[in-house]
Image (tube, helix red, strand yellow):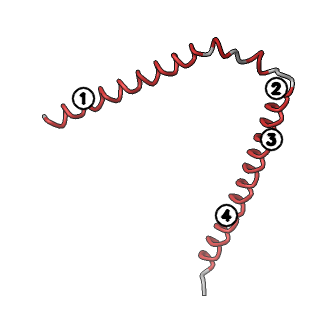
Amino acid sequence: MLSATHAAVLQLLAVGLDLLAQLIQCLNLALVLSRHRNQVLGGAFLGYDLLDYFVDIRHTCGLLYLAEGVLENVHLEIEERKVHSQMVSKR
């Protein structure tokens, strides 16, 4: 037989798991609704050619250059840290 404290702990665990299951269901519903909203908006934009007002392919290369520059800086920083850690470990 379980003692009263063990039974109480198991009951609390069961309640916690039920709450977690409900939270997961709510998050799942929120994700489904968000995906549905994005599909509706994307369909409306594509259906009425509204994306042309938001995206102009001729002028987006600057965004790519910006992203490439950020990635290059991150790569350089990682390489510098590797070299620094190698120098410290050799000491």
Label annotation for residue 84? 1
Crowdedness of circle 3 by 10 Å Cα count: few (<14), some, many (20+)?
few
Relative image position of residue 73 (x, y in whole percent): 41, 21
- For the residue labelled by badge 2, is the local secondary structure a helix, a strand or a loop? helix
Cα separation between marks 1 and 4:
46 Å
In front: mark 1 or mark 3?
A: 3
Q: Name the image quarter holding residue 82.
A: top left
Of the residues shown, which amino acid type is indicated by label 4? Leu
Label annotation for residue 45? 2
Crowdedness of circle 1 by 10 Å Cα count: few (<14), some, many (20+)?
few
| Side of 42 relative to 9 (left or right) | right
In front: mark 1 or mark 4?
A: 1
Cα separation between marks 2 and 3:
14 Å
Q: Which badge, 2 or 3, is on the more N-terminal residue?
A: 3
- Which residue sits furthest bottom? 1
- Which residue sits furthest front? 58
Q: Which badge, 2 or 4, is on the more N-terminal residue?
A: 4
Going 62% across and 16% down the picture, which residue do you hit? 60
In front: mark 2 or mark 4?
A: 2
| In front of the other: 60 or 66 | 60
Label annotation for residue 17? 4
Provide the residue designation for mark 3: 36
Of the residues shown, which amino acid type is indicated by label 3? His
Of the residues shown, which amino acid type is indicated by label 2? Phe
